[in-house]
Every structure is written in C-alpha cells, then in structure tokens.
Image (cartoon, rainbow, N blue to C red):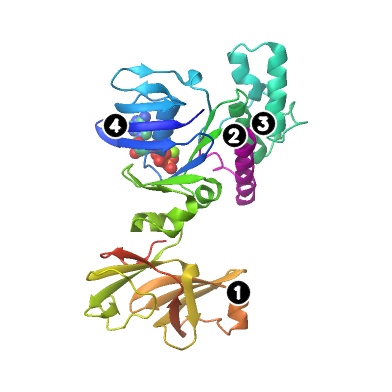
Amino acid sequence: MADVRIEGLGKSYGGRAVLSALSLDLNDGECFTLLGPSGCGKTVLLRLVAGFEIPDSGTVSIGGEAVANAATGVMVPPDKRGLGVVFQDYAVWPHMNVFDNVSYPLKLARTDTTSLQERTARAVELVGLRGLEARLPSQLSGGQQQRVALARALVSEPRLLLLDEPLNNLDANLREEMRFEIKALQRKLGITIFYVTHDQEIALSIADRLAVMDENGVLRQIGAPEEVYEHPGDPFVFRFLGIANFLPVRRDGDALYIGGSSAAWVGPHPNRPGGKLSAGFRPSDVLLARDGDGLPGTVRRASFLGAQVDYLIDIAGTLIRAALPSHECLARNLLFVEGDSCRVGLATVQWFEGDTGGGMAT
Ligand SMILES: Nc1ncnc2c1ncn2[C@@H]1O[C@H](COP(=O)(O)OP(=O)(O)OP(=O)(O)O)[C@@H](O)[C@H]1O
Ligand SMILES: [Mg+2]
C-alpha cells in the first residue's frame, strides 16, 4: 500500500513560509497531479515527501507508516521510504551507459549481481530502451535520456513514484508521447504517482485526481480533472486550467448589463443574486454570428491557426478570446477580419461573485 497522508505540513525558509498547515491525501495506486504556478512550493512539497527536506511542522506518512513527524522528530531517510524520484533536472550520469545509470540504485543497495541484472533488464524493457543498454547519454535523444531517469527511478520497484516536471526539457511531441507512457506505466505497475507540474494540459491528461495550488502554497481545489475543469471553485482555478475569459456583469433590478456600459447581457443567466458578477468562459465556449441577438462585439484580431481560428473580440470595452473550428468558419461564413462587427453568444458560463478584473487571463 502506498497511500500518502500529509497533515498540517509547514515549511519556511529564512522566516518566509512556503507551505503552511498543508493537508493532502493520495490514494493507493492513483496518479495524482499537483498543479501550480512557478515558485508556489511544488518542489518543496515533493522534497518533503521524499525526505530531502525536514518539515517545520506536520506529518507525512506513506502506506500507513509515519516517515516524517515534526513534533516527534521522526525522519525516515529518503532511501528507506520506498520511493522512486525523478526531479526537475533529471540528470543522468553522462559518463555511465544506460545499464549502469539504471542499475546504480541497486548497486548502492548492494543487490547481488544476478538480481541486479534481472531487475535492470526489466526496468530498461519497461521504458522501451531495450537494445540501448550500452549507449552513453550523449548518444541518446532527450526523450530517451528521460526514460533512463524514469527506469532508474523504477528499478528499485518503488511503491510511490515522485515526478517533478520530468518532461520539461522535451519537445511538444515527445512530451505528449511520454505522458501517455507514464500513465501506461502506472496502470501496468499499479504504483502511486505524485506528479507536480505547472503545465495544465499534462496535469489534466494524466491525473486520476489533481490539486491546484496558488502562489501562496495554498491548495484551492482537489478533484477529478473533469470535475475541477468543469466546476472550478474560484477564478484562480478557472484561470489556471486554460485560457479564461471574464466579462464583468452588473445586475440592475432584473436586468443584467456588461460592466459599466449600457450593453444588455444576452446569454446564460446566473441563478444567484448579487450586484457585481463575473461571467467566466473559455474561448471554445464562444458562439459567433454575423448578426442576430448575441452580445455586440468588434473583432480586434483574427488569427488562422490551421484547425481553428482564434479571435480577439472587444465587447463593451472588455477583450475576450474566441476559438472556432476552421471548418465551421468556412461553412458558416464566419471568417472575420479585423474591424468586423459580430455577435457573441456563449454556450456555457461559470459565474463568480464580484469583480475578477475582467478581460482575458492569458
Ligand atoms: N532551499 C531553499 N532555500 C530558500 N528558499 C527556497 C529553498 N527551496 C525553495 N525555496 C523557495 O520556496 C519557494 C517555492 O519553491 P519551489 O521550488 O517549491 O517552487 P515550484 O512550485 O517548484 O516552482 P517551479 O514550477 O518553478 O519549479 C520559492 O520562493 C523558492 O525560492
Ligand atoms: Mg519546482
């Protein structure tokens, strides 16, 4: 069993708290991703779980065993925690070939030769590097080096795999391929994966559950990817999971208006009271027309991106992004150019209280 329980965890550096009273549970066998902006404390958290850092307060247990407890001083060293780790700078040793790199943890643990050879061969096979055992890292592609790091983390047959942005240095195609492979590995081995990243696409695509952390190291929301994506708890989470549009909406009696303008709101209605509201929606939620009864807008920029057309649209002084499939634009005469007026409809809206600052998040 490798469920992870983190309770009341705190860590400061030089009097500055990075994490305070953080609690989080990972279930046995799940792939859990932690998503948050750069500098929010993801690596610090992973290092605390791994045992490379000592918590100021709180506890960490893995598989029911307390591995760190600030109050009692319990601190199980990293190599006794049953973990595999791939950190941000996944450094493989340049002077060692693939076999030696992967088998290194077993060598350190003084594993007997037969077992070392068997287990290394298995780990190499698992990440698809069979036949390349004698190569040096300099003779491998970035993705292959990445797999060496992964095989090295897996060779001790850990119950928990900690991954810290392990795909950062790869190009887009390889990154996509590797994330499917990590997911496949998790299923095959049944291990628990704790994956931290600031890349929302990776987080959404491989997670069974994910948590979103804000810049202060506070967990804003935890849930299944589709749950968090479809029902973000607050504007921060909504912004962080993709390109986000916000339109300020003002309630006046029964009528709704856009921001400070006299433009009447047309579209899905909030079922909550309140003066100031913010309508949040994704570029793909925008429906465009040349005329009709949508919100009146002006196209400020039109970019043809192949599969889709990306528009920047001004609605009563607020800029929003819209993304329409190219085939739809062609079929429905919706290839706008800069300066065109248009009508904007919304397929779905997330309502937030108050003013979120309006406009686009990214
Ligand atoms: N050893 C340390 N000494 C002092 N400050 C540290 C130390 N380690 C981390 N920090 C600080 O803690 C904060 C969180 O750092 P952390 O590396 O966890 O961020 P992160 O979320 O992993 O960011 P990124 O996405 O860029 O990797 C940062 O402000 C960082 O400067
Ligand atoms: Mg980091």
Calculate the distance from the C-alpha at mark 2 to the C-alpha at mark 3.
Answer: 29 Å
Number of the front mark, 1 or 2: 2
Q: Circle 4 sits on which residue?
A: 12
Where residue 213 sits, quadrant-wise, is top left
The vertical placement of 300 against 281, above or below, is below
> Is residue 37 at least partly visible in the picture?
no
Q: Circle 1 sits on which residue?
A: 326
Magenta segment boundaries in residue numbering: 163-189
Number of the front mark, 2 or 3: 2
Residue at (59% x, 19% y) in the render: 105
Q: Are marks 2 and 3 in contact (CB under 8 Å)?
A: no
Q: Earlier in the sequence, mark 2 or mark 4?
A: 4
Could you say which disc has been placed on residue 137 in the image?
3
Residue at (43% x, 76% y) in the render: 313
The percent coordinates of residue 160 (x first, y second) are: 52, 30
Number of the front mark, 2 or 4: 2
Q: Circle 2 sits on which residue?
A: 190
